[in-house]
Image: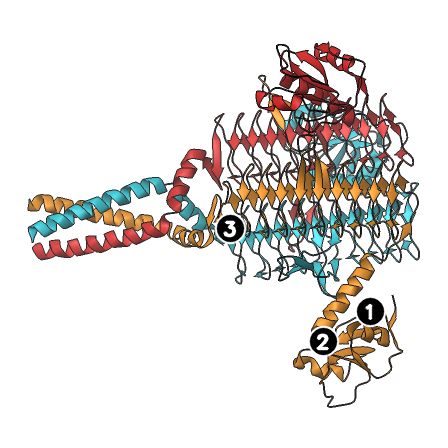
Chain colours: A red, B cyan, C orange
Amino acid sequence: MEFTVNQVAAMLGGEVNGNGNQKINMLGKIQDAKEGQIAFLSNPKYEQYIYTTLATAVIVKRDFVARKEISATLILVDDPYISFTRLLEEYHKLVSFQKSGVEQPSFMGENSTIGNGYYRGAFSYIGNNVKIGEQVKIYPHAYVGDNVVIGDHCIIHSGVKIYADTKIGNHCVIHSGTVIGSDGFGFAPQSDGSYKTIPQLGTVIIEDHVAIGANTVIDCATLFGDATVVRQGVKLDNLIQIAHNVEIGKNTVIAAQAGISGSTKIGENCMIAGQVGISGHIVIANHTGIGAQAGISKSIKEEGKKLMGSPAYDFSEYYKAYAVFKKLPDIFHRLRAVEDKAKKSENTSLSVD
Amino acid sequence: MEFTVNQVAAMLGGEVNGNGNQKINMLGKIQDAKEGQIAFLSNPKYEQYIYTTLATAVIVKRDFVARKEISATLILVDDPYISFTRLLEEYHKLVSFQKSGVEQPSFMGENSTIGNGYYRGAFSYIGNNVKIGEQVKIYPHAYVGDNVVIGDHCIIHSGVKIYADTKIGNHCVIHSGTVIGSDGFGFAPQSDGSYKTIPQLGTVIIEDHVAIGANTVIDCATLFGDATVVRQGVKLDNLIQIAHNVEIGKNTVIAAQAGISGSTKIGENCMIAGQVGISGHIVIANHTGIGAQAGISKSIKEEGKKLMGSPAYDFSEYYKAYAVFKKLPDIFHRLRAVEDKAKKSENTSLSVD
Amino acid sequence: MEFTVNQVAAMLGGEVNGNGNQKINMLGKIQDAKEGQIAFLSNPKYEQYIYTTLATAVIVKRDFVARKEISATLILVDDPYISFTRLLEEYHKLVSFQKSGVEQPSFMGENSTIGNGYYRGAFSYIGNNVKIGEQVKIYPHAYVGDNVVIGDHCIIHSGVKIYADTKIGNHCVIHSGTVIGSDGFGFAPQSDGSYKTIPQLGTVIIEDHVAIGANTVIDCATLFGDATVVRQGVKLDNLIQIAHNVEIGKNTVIAAQAGISGSTKIGENCMIAGQVGISGHIVIANHTGIGAQAGISKSIKEEGKKLMGSPAYDFSEYYKAYAVFKKLPDIFHRLRAVEDKAKKSENTSLSVD
């Protein structure tokens, strides 16, 4: 991963002022960048650093006028911040997808295929009849069970466990320790107090552009032919529980340690905060916002609501009630005082009568 | 896994009506089953599909009378739903236990034994002096530490980590990413504000017929000779925390993301909902039910209680109080109004006097 | 690991009374110790057992006077309990660090080094340019990404996943399934309702003497050069979420299933109980205590506060309010009664007027 200043400028549609043949291999901050790095200047507050930076190149605004000599090569663009962000993204993509080839020992079962540009880390396991698309990176200790299908441009980080028959779309990233397709939690009570396992025979479907954090769990559906479904663009954080037969709507975002119980359907573009718990067999409307640690026990039918509390209800109503909750000892005291007065006044009235 | 219709009928004690030599390799729903599949008809609402289904065989009630021609072979039984459920269970067992033999590379230390019908997946690790019973399936990337004992008919899924000296009974299933026997969280405060590690030298005992979900953690006991114990028939969901020296009674069921603190004893046949937290060093009576997100801070001595809230108390009392909580802003308003009236009335009384 | 009684006595500064050449290979409790084990007698209540114990040696107080014959060899010390604890710690250290050498297959990339006394378990993975100190134990299925630095005397348990560029100090223990350095949860909303990934390019720094439980997750920082930081002496339990750019102060202790949101700074010597949730971008003062399941939404500026509730505030104020919360149905009833009286008295007053 080494580019010339000219190559970077071409990518950003920028103009080079200085030696464009110099090599860049890293991004840095203008105040502490080193040789071989590229930085940017957007906020005028940082202008002082452009005259002393060791960076090989600095991205500046097209109308930037230097007040002193600058040793770095300049790349002139319309918006240095946006250009740098784009560079960051490209860099991130390059770093994320840089691993390639196969490390040994690794395991690949019968009738399994993987497209071009793959990485199969040491100790990665791919079962039988697995179909994996192009530019997919399977890190060390990842487990991909039999009959799994994975699309293109996915990253399966170290130690991810994907049970048999799971389907994963394109452009998905799954972080370490996450488990997809484990048995749903289904047990039928028996007359002697014990429980009998209800076979969990469904699968999990993860659509395109889904990101899943570390140590999250997504259980498979109960019945044959059914699936727990995570729709396109969903972003799941770490340590989340998604139970069997759940469906999570397009572009919904769920923060760490939240849990969704079985058969619940979450709408599109919802925002679910950390440690939220959602009961089973309910439906959450699109654009619902749920505050941290809230507990949702009933379906939310109206779109765009914001909820808080356990059980949760309207966010601002909850906060108003909670503000009074804090005063409860005082309220109780005042209630008794007013009761005493009422009793006294009653007695007075009685004596008046 | 291919059976003839006759074989399936024999297993179910059913009577065959049609060609019993046809092959079945999959279960399906009557409305979308394909050739080679077996479906069932129980609910009369679905009768229409039996005349068009592509299923090779359909399980029907003994007294079923066809109103049109049916191409599928019929298996006549007393209760089609129960028969199909039994088939599901058999199928599930077959699928779950179908892996066998050893994939390479895998690791097995000195003096370790494993019974007949085993599966040892690639990259599975079995330490020294391990004793594993018959029909045990150790999936890829599972880790079984030194001196561990595992009974018969267990499934240890991919990436399960079992620390040294753990004991696991028969018919247990442990899902991916679960950790058993990690150090209990014990640290002694020192005068300089730092903490000293209290050695965790006990073990974990898991009895028979225990099911454990994915990414759950069960810590070992603190003292030599002591154990964290999970009794027979317990069912644990995903992402659960079981701290050191906890004991979980027979047939207790715990839902995802619940946490039990150190040295607490949970009784038999309890039902603990998701995200519940239970304090350390307490005792929970048999048949206790604990609602989602509840926090239990004191021992529950009476059996059969249902609890809610944090700290938790009687379930229906909690809901009554919570219903009033929602009205707190209004209550506060009304309290002030009645205070005003009382003051006014007091003044009036005073003026009366 | 076998010592003579004389060796143990020398280590404890104790005096031997009996055959000091006998071999000891295990610690035990005086009431059920077996041959080859060493026990202790501190509480006089247990004195009876010293006359019947099968232990090879028993640690007793220097002034202990036997009332009957004792077959065990005695080690006389100032404080038997403290001596035994020291023995436990030594034993634990020996057991923890006893594994050594390399098991095959294991993987070590280019330009990586590991110091003396190492253990590299089968299927452990060490990437490129990794620097690992002395006496470090890397258990099976552990993953150490490129450019990671690990100090001396660390234990990385089975299945731990350490992403590239992470830095870990000396004397750290990390339990199975824990993930360090996964991407922070950062997504920028787009006009079409979808989200764009914000590249997470920072790292994680873990200082010395940090203990981390099982299946915990620590995300990397967002920006280049930034780090999520866990300071010296911090103890983290199982299943904890530490988001990007968080900093956890020296000697702070966090119990299981707690979650800290992005960019929050936790002070030194805080005690955070189980299932606590802490919002992002806030600061928690030193010596703060946070009760189980509490939710912290604002910075805590004053040191030494104890908090409870969600949102949390003063611990004892919360409990006082919660005590009144339980009475809310009764309070509501009484409020209505006093309203009725007030109305009646008002009417009376009116009629008086």
Residue A185 can be seen, yes or no: no
Label 3 element class: loop
Q: Which residue is mark 1?
A: C26
Residue toward you, A127 or B164: B164
Q: Which secondary structure lies at badge 1?
A: strand
**How far across and down, in percent of the image, does residue A73 sit?**
73, 16
Which label's residue is closer to the chain start, 3 or 2?
Answer: 2
Q: Is residue C237 above or below residue B10?
A: below
Please provide percent x and percent y for residue C283: 54, 42
Please tell me which residue lies in front, C352 or A14.
A14
Question: Quick one: label 1, few (<14), some, or many (20+) residues within 10 Å?
Answer: many
Pointer 3 residue: C303
| Amino acid identity at mark 2 | Pro
Nearer to us: label 3 or label 2: 3
Looking at the picture, does residue A133 appear above or below residue C211? above
Residue highlighted by disc 2: C80
Tag 2 and tag 1, C-beta contact below 8 Å: no
Give the left or right position of residue C137, taking residue A198 as reference: right
Determine the CA span between mark 3 and mark 1: 45 Å
Chain label for disc 2: C
Q: Residue furthest front?
A: A68
Amino acid type for the residue under numbered disc 1: Met
Task: Answer whether labels 3 and 1 touch (C-beta < 8 Å).
Answer: no
Q: Residue at x 86, y 20 (%)?
A: A116
Residue B43, quarter of the rendered image? top right
